[in-house]
Amino acid sequence: MYQRLLVTGVSGYVGLHMAVEGLQRGYIIRGTVRSDKKAVECRNYLKDLVSKQQLAQFEVVTADLTKPDCWDTIIKGCDAIFHVASPLAASNRRDEHKLVTTTREGVKHVFEAAIRQGVTRIVYTSSVAAVMFGHDGSKTHYIDSDWSHVEGKLNTAYIRSKTFTEQDAWRYAENHPELELTSILPGFILGPIIKNHTNLSTGLVGAVMSGAFPSGVINIHFPIVDIRDIVLAHFNSVERKQSIGERIMLGCKSIWMREMAEVILAENPQFKDKINPKTMPRWLLKIFSLYNASLRHLAMEANVQRELSYQKAQDLLEISPRSPEEAVLATAKDLIRLGLVS
């Protein structure tokens, strides 16, 4: 039984949920953040979610994925690592290169320090972005052995970063047989919100609810996974030997953005003047994409249907996934509760 877990990126959407679950399970949690400000914010969020006794088992330290010097000290004394930290977005080509480099350096520095400190159990948070992009257009079903083709179509810096870094992680495991690695590959993450602001995924639901798509939503197919199932997958992985050496996808079912809008509207009819559940015409999407970089990336995904295998998650981790509809509605509920949409 492990006692002290390191959670990198503990102030993020996934990391903060990890901390709450770990503390409630009785673990000692050491989390990393990028700044002292985020450390204070993180403790402030946690104090309302766990008991004083549990919070006393939480330690937060600042760290930089690009700097190797701090990681030996941070990892020393830990029994296992959840390597969650990863930058998400890039606004220009220079930032795109930095995103890929930063993510890969993070794996390098964390894994090499873990090897030096004798910490062999690592659960790495990858993404289905490392699986389902750049393939032939006829491919619609994906399994855990598939890898994204980083030189193919529909690729972004984020896709390249997640693909390259997970491959780096598995090379470390291959070259260091003592490492016990599991990679968890979530789909589009929705569900309850702890922090009083949105991230990339919850922000898209907020955009739909705030009237950002008055001409109709984009015809995108999302492999949605609930944040609660992601957290459960990580803890079940670290507590079960059968997950060692496995890539495990989490994306139980994919739904269209139109279906997402319909689900929200059915439960929240007060948003009928904001939410247009129809699909935006392709010609109009092309025009909007010329002037909006964010829409351009989403437009690349329009009309592409993908389904993911959830078999390993069920067989190895005994997870019965929540439905996409439940995850969507949990996000919408908390967006309203936190005043992030009106």
Image (cartoon, rainbow, N blue to C red):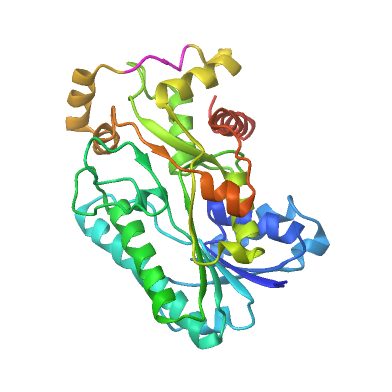
- Is 100 placed above or below 309 here? below
Which secondary structure is most common in the magenta stretch? Answer: loop
Q: Nearer the viewer, residue 147 or 113?
A: 147
Q: Is residue 70 visible?
A: no
Q: Residue at x 60, y 72 (%)?
A: 80
260 on left or right of 61 = left
42 on left or right of 341 = right
Q: Is residue 43 visible?
A: yes
Looking at this rendering, what residue extends furthest in the bottom direction? 116
Quadrant housing the C terminus: top right
Examine the image and state in which quarter residue 51 appears.
bottom right
Question: Magenta stretch containing residue 277, yes or no?
Answer: yes
169 on left or right of 191 = left
Examine the image and state in which quarter residue 282 appears.
top left
Question: Magenta stretch containing residue 310, yes or no?
Answer: no
What residue range appears in magenta? 273-279
Q: Residue at x 56, y 85 (%)?
A: 118
Residue 19 lies, in percent from the top left, at 65, 59
Q: Nearer the viewer, residue 245 or 332?
A: 245
Total marks shown come to 0
Q: Residue at x 60, y 41 (%)?
A: 193
153 on left or right of 146 = left
Q: Residue at x 38, y 31 (%)?
A: 221
